[in-house]
Amino acid sequence: MLKGVFTPMITIFDENGQFDNKSNKAMIEKLISDGIYGICILGTTGEFFNLTFEEKKQYIKFALEVINGRVKLIVGTGSTNLKEVIELGKFAEENNADAILVLPPFYFKLDDNHVFEYFSIIAENTNLPMILYNIPQNTKVNLSPDLVLKLANKYENIANGGVKDTTPALANVRNFVEKVKSVHKNFAVFSGIDEYLIPNLIIGGNGIVGTQTNTQAKLMVETYKTFMNKDFDKLLLLQKRINKIMAVREMPGSNNILSTKTAASIALNMDFNTSIRYYDIKLPKETKDRIERIVKQK
């Protein structure tokens, strides 16, 4: 069963848009040394939309070689091209990834029957555990617990996978726990927002796949372990620290990818390109200074 604290890792590119092997390797090594349970590549924060199919395959091989079995690797397979989703899932499986993170069809809105068909086709073409990615603010598709239960009832790799819910509604987590996890014990319910780690666990979920773990893995892992040890007094203090770091994703005039990359460069004390691929977007010094104070808890 998948559980714990996972990082949807940023993808670092140089000023010319080329994959920055050195910086990406340093990120992976830092996350592992900070105790992360697993790394998710090619998610939203990882700019899956900015890589070609061949580049995604190269990235999977790169990540698996660097990780070398030390933590789990989840591969995002998001695409509007169903054939590419299937082929990338097969490639991830052939190269011994641990699970895939699968978006519903996006850009064009489909009803539940068509979304069920979409996930069914993918599930029938992989043996890897599938984590269904619920992020309706981006996809315009909200995965209902009833639909997810129907899929888990039919497909073992979904029943042994889970859901990542990136919405502000904790009721979603509760409904996935009560309707799906209560039936399928190996079904993992993750939150995609870091500040929901403790509420997620209290409700009965399994952890987070949270962006701020790119810089705050130690804090989030400590929080997870503290909950497992039932030290609830300490949890209150840790939640206050988590609350403070959430300001990184709420920087005015910024973007979550930009602010997270900037925070990561500060946390690692590395001078890498923090822009979104193919753009030359840099945060103002004032915003960068604010992020530095948050990252360093000043």
Image: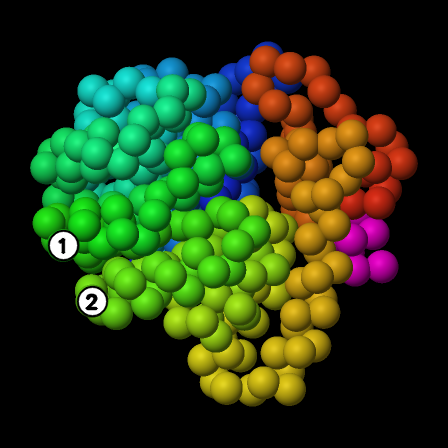
Whether residue 6 sits left or right of residue 77 in the image: it is right
Of residues 9 and 182, which is closer to you in this image?
A: 182
User: Can you identify the residue that label 2 sits on?
Assistant: 183
Whether residue 40 sits left or right of residue 149 in the image: it is right
Residue 29, can we see it? no
Name the kind of residue labelled 2 in the image: Val
Locate the C terminus and report the quarter of the image it occupies. bottom right
Helix, strand or loop under label 2: loop
> Is 294 colored magenta in this rendering?
yes
Question: What is the distance, in whole Å, between disc 2 and disc 1 at their CAs?
Answer: 9 Å
Q: Colour scheme used in the picture?
A: rainbow
Query: Which corner quadrant of the image does residue 97 belong to?
Result: top left
Of residues 242 and 103, which is closer to you in this image?
A: 103
Taking the spot 12% from the left edge, 48% from the top edge, the residue there is 155
Q: Where residue 210 is drawn, which disc sits there?
A: none
Taking the spot 46% from the left edge, 40% from the top edge, the residue there is 135
Q: Position of residue 208 (x, y in %)?
A: 47, 58
Stretch of the chain drawn in magenta: 292-298
> Is 195 colored magenta in this rendering?
no
Q: State whether residue 257 is above or below residue 171.
A: above
Helix, strand or loop under label 1: helix
Q: Are marks 2 and 1 in contact (CB under 8 Å)?
A: yes
User: Can you identify the residue that label 1 sits on?
Assistant: 153
Of residues 268 and 202, which is closer to you in this image?
A: 202
- Crowding near pointer 1: few (<14 within 10 Å), some, many (20+)? some
Of callouts 2 and 1, which one flags the residue occurring earlier in the amino acid sequence? 1
Q: Position of residue 76 (x, y in %)?
A: 36, 36
Residue 23, can we see it? yes
Whether residue 42 sits left or right of residue 232 in the image: it is left
Q: Position of residue 211 (x, y in %)?
A: 56, 47
- Crowding near pointer 2: few (<14 within 10 Å), some, many (20+)? some
